[in-house]
Amino acid sequence: MWDPAIATTLTPGPPGFTDVRVFPAAARDGRADYGRGMRGLLVVNPVATTTTERVRDVLASALAADVAMETVLTKGRGHGVELGARAVELGVDVVIALGGDGTVNEITNGLLQNGPIDDGPALAVVPGGSTNVFARALGYSASPVEATGELLDALREGRSRRISIGRAEYGDEGRWFTFCFGIGLDARVVAQAEEKRRKGRRNSAGLFLRTAAGQVTRGADRGAPPITLETTDAHSLPVDAALPADAALPADASVPADSGQADAEAAGSAEERIALGIVCNTRPWTYLNSRPVLACPEASFDTGLDLLALRRVRLSSVLRTASQILGDGRGPHGRNVVRRHDAAVIRFLADHPLPLQMDGEYLGEYVDVTLTHHPRALRVIA
């Protein structure tokens, strides 16, 4: 049964779910048949762009046939972290996020508050925001209704996988990110878009496009202090090195990355001076409605962190890079472009505070940030 300590914050689930059997550990890694019962927590962001009460009710009703579930509405920023941590304490089998990428990021940080654990709750996502990069990168449809059907199929078949994620250390803070991190112009655009949303503008791809265009044409970051970029060798296993679902990554699993890039783009210990940086943990970086935006075309949940950086921020070079990102899938290239593939550690060091964003959420301004890659850290239903 549910712990009474959490019952006061949750909307009671459908009747008849008091006798709950926990999904067995073997099935949590996709190695057992479904049907033994699961205990789930549905976390809903009620102010997410495409989340409505009707969508929430339809989703809860559909999941109730297969999952003994409680539902909670987030009350504000940070509540998702608390709920994710509480789900770990209670031994919940799956936490289902109905919201945007910010909601997913908070729940992930709650689930991993004390670091990755082998038998912790799995994370499932139903898109409820405007972009939903993480959910779509896992293969879910952009439609909440279609994604719910796909999620139910995965739950019934006991499908789950472990993915890599990144962690950022900045100032006195530490936080996990699921798909992207940015410093400089990218983060400044996120900050400006968030400010416009607070003033009543609708969150959309168009809002970010117009904000980015305004920043570039006004010459934002043109005179920004240069950032010292440091990266270390890749450390992911070769793609064809299959591991059992419950196996730990060997400590000596480092292998050279073969990205096919020029010397300046190859993975390995290196230092550069850049003006902005975008780090991806998977592809795409974001979406323009249905169109994927490929800042780091080789990025994957199964490899280390990928980086796209520009040495200078000028209108001509930014426009050229933007056209390449939206082009044929080769990704950005040229003398102004710095790329890294499958990195274990990425550090940015600036002379003056620069804006940061994580998974599309503005973090503030900092001078020193270190990103580390953590393989197989998060179990997802996909």
Image: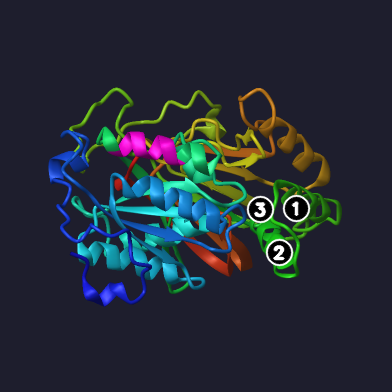
Identify residue type, mark 3.
Answer: Asp
Q: As rendered, which of 132 and 332 lies closer to the eye?
A: 132
Residue 292: name its quadrant: top right
Q: Residue furthest right?
A: 218
Q: Is residue 177 visible?
A: yes
With respect to residue 251, does 218 lie above or below? below
Q: Main secondary structure of the magenta part?
A: helix
Where does label 2 land, which residue? 197
* Range shown magenta: 148-155
| In-image side of 307 versus 161 (left or right) | right
In primary-sequence order, the first of circles 2 and 1 is: 2
Q: CA distance from mark 3 to mark 1?
A: 14 Å
Measured as percent of width and height from the top left, residue 296 is found at: 55, 36
Residue 4: name its quadrant: bottom left
In primary-sequence order, the first of circles 3 and 1 is: 3
Q: Secondary structure at mark 2?
A: helix
Identify residue type, mark 1.
Answer: Leu
With respect to residue 185, does 240 lie above or below? above
Mark nearest the camera among 3 and 1 is 1
Where does label 1 land, which residue? 207
Q: Which mark is residue 186?
A: 3
